[in-house]
């Protein structure tokens, strides 16, 4: 059922970019350190000091180009990077007053120049090899961009109908405008990568047999976990990732006025904020962890708190209360940990007398996501997390590389992108060594 237009409008991207003069003022606060700690904090290798300096002196386009050399997700990362645990974490300016708003300046740079993205320079010579990239999320795109810059042919297989992975089918539009994200990421095609949408990739062995010289796996995490409570199959019980994908597609489900979200990670935070924007009057967020233990980014937890969402930390779900075919409530209980530091449901022990009940029209489960697909010959752990050699991102299958959430188990967009880049280096070294062994081309 459609919601009110006011609620729909509030799903629009929040926050705004700096105006040019504001960006210059913010950039002017940079101390231009000799050994800038911000540079080492960026997984993608963005030269923060240099781009901030360019903005300071009004060379905004130069700043954009410089960032894009390291990371095509200029405006995207300016919006979604948890900078407080990355580039901004050790900003020297913190010792004087407040750190430089690096992501804010990068967001500004991303908005400055989108139309005139430069294609590959003529100096890049095409190589004869072609690499298959499975998944067009940040990891796959990081690999594809870097391979194209080195002249390697790239075919990207993406099973959905849009590039971007979680960026365009997960992170809700009020945090990242999906049209902007898709446009920024489309740069990969201007670099000459072939993108095949709605294509589930064949097995790596088959791709190698069909003439691809190497394969990169960047499939992310596609299998959401569920709790296993009775009533989970009721229509008012949602899996957060499915709900966020539906929102990204423009759907506006009616969640009712009371919504309970279960989970303490970023997906739970996004789902809770989405529920408010879909018209809920009260949203309760229940999670196993304490505030300090919650895996969500600090900045997201603070944002959620500032929106008035009610937290029930260190609790576990007990029951979905239903009347007939309709959810009417949720019951939980306070927990403590049997073994400190092990934040798993099996390590939780109920605290007697802490049982509680909440009214609920809908319940959203956001308790984590696992790997959906496994590939023959590619070694994983028991959860399906692909084992790689960290320097090159090579898997145990010769010629097959991997990166992003399917390797990390879930981290950040910029880390996934950086791993794709690192894998591209590994692939180039692999192709070069093969050429040497085979007596050169
Ligand atoms: C709701 C949500 C909010 C988040 N918020 C933030 C944030 O604010 N900041 C941040 O830095 N990170 C955030 N993250 C994490 C970040 O989005 C991920 O770390 C990142 O997207 C991982 O990139 P990836 O390329 O490894 O995987 P994904 O982004 O999941 O992309 C994988 C792609 O592979 C495709 N695919 C899968 N299997 C196949 C197949 N067999 N054949 C072809 N294609 C296939 C999928 O369709 C998908 O497009 C968030 C994650 C979620 C779920
Ligand atoms: S890409 Fe992200 S981590 Fe790197 S400098 Fe930009 S905002 Fe910081």
Image (cartoon, rainbow, N blue to C red):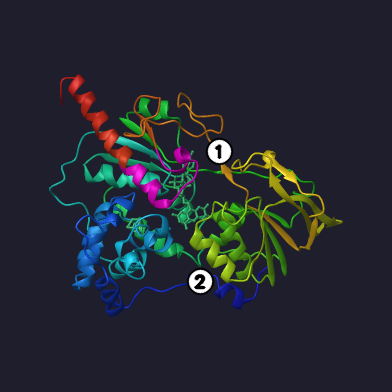
**Left or right of residue 371, residue 420 in this image:** left
Question: Taking the image as four quarters, which one is ligand 2 found in?
Answer: bottom left
Mark 1, Cα crowd under 10 Å, few <14 / some 14-19 / many 20+, is some
- Look at the image and tell me whether residue 200 can be seen: no
Compared to 358, does 392 lie above or below?
A: above
The residue under the point 57% across, 71% down is 306
Compared to 417, does 59 lie above or below?
A: below
**Left or right of residue 366, residue 220 in this image:** left
Alpha-carbon span between mark 2 and mark 1 = 30 Å
The residue under the point 14% across, 50% down is 122
Name the residue furthest left.
Answer: 123
Residue 439 locus on image (x, y percent): 15, 20
Q: Is residue 360 magenta?
A: no
Q: Nearer the viewer, residue 216 or 310?
A: 310
**Which residue lies under the disc numbered 1?**
372
Residue 226 locus on image (x, y percent): 67, 45
Mark 1 Cβ and ligand 1 under 8 Å apart: yes
Residue 280 locus on image (x, y percent): 68, 70
**Which residue lies under the disc numbered 2?**
12
Q: Nearer the viewer, residue 426 or 215?
A: 426
Q: Earlier in the sequence, mark 2 or mark 1?
A: 2
Residue 81 locus on image (x, y percent): 41, 58
Quadrant placement of the N terminus: bottom right
Q: Is residue 408 magenta?
A: yes
Task: Give the magenta-colored segment's residue range.
Answer: 403-421
Picture quarter containing residue 347? top right
The residue under the point 22% across, 59% down is 66
């Amino acid at each position: 059922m459609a919601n009110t237009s006011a609620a729909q409008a509030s799903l629009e991207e929040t926050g705004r970019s700096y105006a040019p003069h504001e960006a210059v003022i913010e950039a002017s606060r940079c101390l231009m350190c000799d050994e800038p700690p911000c540079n080492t904090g960026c997984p993608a290798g963005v030269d923060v000091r240099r781009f901030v300096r360019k903005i300071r002196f009004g060379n905004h386009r130069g700043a954009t180009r410089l960032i894009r050399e390291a990371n095509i997700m200029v405006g995207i990362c300016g919006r979604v990077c948890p900078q407080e645990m990355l580039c901004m974490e050790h900003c020297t300016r913190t010792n004087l007053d407040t750190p430089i708003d690096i992501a804010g300046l990068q967001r500004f740079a991303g908005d400055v120049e989108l139309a005139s993205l430069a294609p590959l320079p003529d100096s890049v010579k095409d190589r004869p090899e072609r690499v298959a990239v499975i998944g067009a999320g940040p990891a796959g795109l990081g690999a594809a961009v870097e391979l194209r810059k080195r002249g390697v042919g790239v075919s990207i297989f993406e099973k959905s109908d849009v590039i971007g992975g979680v960026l365009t089918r997960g992170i809700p539009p009020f945090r990242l405008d999906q049209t902007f994200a898709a446009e920024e990421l489309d740069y990969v095609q201007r670099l000459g990568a072939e993108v095949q949408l709605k294509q589930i990739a064949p097995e790596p062995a088959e791709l190698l047999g069909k003439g691809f010289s190497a394969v990169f796996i960047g499939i992310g995490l596609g299998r959401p976990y569920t709790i296993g409570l009775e009533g989970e199959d009721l229509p008012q019980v949602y899996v957060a990732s499915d709900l966020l994908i539906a929102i990204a597609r423009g759907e506006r489900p009616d969640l009712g006025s009371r919504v309970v979200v279960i989970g303490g990670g970023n997906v739970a935070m996004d789902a809770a904020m989405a529920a408010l924007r879909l018209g809920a009057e009260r949203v309760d967020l229940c999670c196993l962890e304490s505030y300090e233990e919650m895996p969500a980014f600090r900045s997201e937890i603070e944002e959620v708190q500032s929106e008035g969402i009610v937290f029930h930390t260190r609790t576990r779900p007990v029951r979905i209360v239903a009347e007939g075919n309709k959810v009417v409530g949720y019951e939980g209980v306070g927990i403590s940990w049997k073994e400190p530091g092990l934040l798993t449901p099996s390590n939780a022990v109920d605290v007697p007398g802490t049982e509680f009940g909440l009214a609920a029209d809908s319940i959203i489960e956001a308790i984590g996501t696992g790997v959906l697909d496994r590939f023959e010959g590619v070694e994983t752990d028991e959860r399906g997390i692909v084992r790689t050699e960290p320097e090159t991102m090579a898997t145990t299958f010769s010629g097959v590389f991997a990166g992003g959430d399917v390797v990390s188990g879930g981290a950040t967009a910029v880390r996934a992108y950086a791993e794709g880049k690192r894998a591209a280096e590994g692939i180039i070294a692999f192709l070069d060594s093969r050429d040497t062994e085979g007596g050169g081309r």
